[in-house]
Image (cartoon, rainbow, N blue to C red):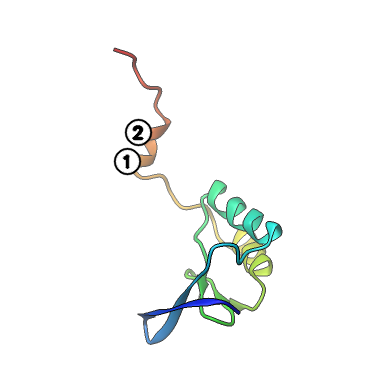
C-alpha cells in the first residue's frame, strides 16, 4: 500500500493520506455515490476504512460505501447548501 509519510492523529488512531492514482474506478465511483447522496465519507486507517457515524470498519472501500448508503441517512442541508441551490440572478 502506498501512503504519504505524514500521519494525523484522530482519537488515538494514526490516519494516513493516499497518493493520487491509488483508487480504482469502482472505488472512485463509490466515493462519488457517497458525495452525491450526501452521506458521510469513510476514514482511511491504513489497512481498513471506518464509518465516522457508527465506527464500523471494513477492509474494502466499496463494502464500506455500501454500508454507509444502506445504514445512514443523508446529511441535512445547511445554509450554504441551500444558497447554492437557489437560482442566481444576472445583473
Name the residue nearer the viewer: 5 or 55: 5
> Is residue 78 placed above or below 17 in the rendered structure?
above
Measure the alpha-carbon separation of dots 2 and 1.
6 Å
> Is residue 90 placed above or below 70 in the rendered structure?
above
Name the residue nearer the viewer: 59 or 66: 59
- Give the image quarter of residue 72: bottom right
Q: Residue at x 33, y 40 (%)?
A: 80
> Is residue 24 placed above or below 48 in the rendered structure?
above
**Would you name the residue on which mark 2 appears?**
83
Q: Residue at x 54, y 56 (%)?
A: 73
Image coords of residue 79 (percent x, y): 32, 41
Quadrant into which the N terminus falls? bottom right
Image coords of residue 30 (percent x, y): 64, 57
Q: Which mark is residue 34?
A: none
Q: Alpha-carbon neighbours of circle 1 within 10 Å: few (<14), some, or many (≥20)?
A: few
Q: Which mark is residue 79?
A: 1
The residue most toward the top is 91
Image coords of residue 41 (percent x, y): 51, 62
- Give the image quarter of residue 86: top left
SS of the residue at dot 2?
Answer: helix
Image coords of residue 17 (percent x, y): 47, 72
> Is residue 10 placed above or below 71 in the rendered structure?
below
Quick check: 25 left or right of 75?
right
Amino acid at each position: 500500500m502506498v501512503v504519504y509519510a505524514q500521519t494525523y492523529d484522530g482519537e488515538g488512531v494514526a490516519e494516513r493520506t493516499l497518493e493520487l492514482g491509488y483508487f480504482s474506478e469502482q472505488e472512485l465511483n463509490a466515493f462519488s455515490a457517497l458525495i452525491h447522496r450526501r452521506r458521510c465519507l469513510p476514514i482511511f486507517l491504513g489497512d481498513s476504512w471506518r464509518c465516522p457515524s457508527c465506527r464500523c470498519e471494513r477492509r474494502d472501500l466499496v463494502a464500506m460505501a455500501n454500508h454507509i448508503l444502506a445504514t445512514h441517512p443523508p446529511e441535512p442541508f445547511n445554509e450554504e447548501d441551500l444558497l447554492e441551490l437557489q437560482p442566481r440572478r444576472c445583473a
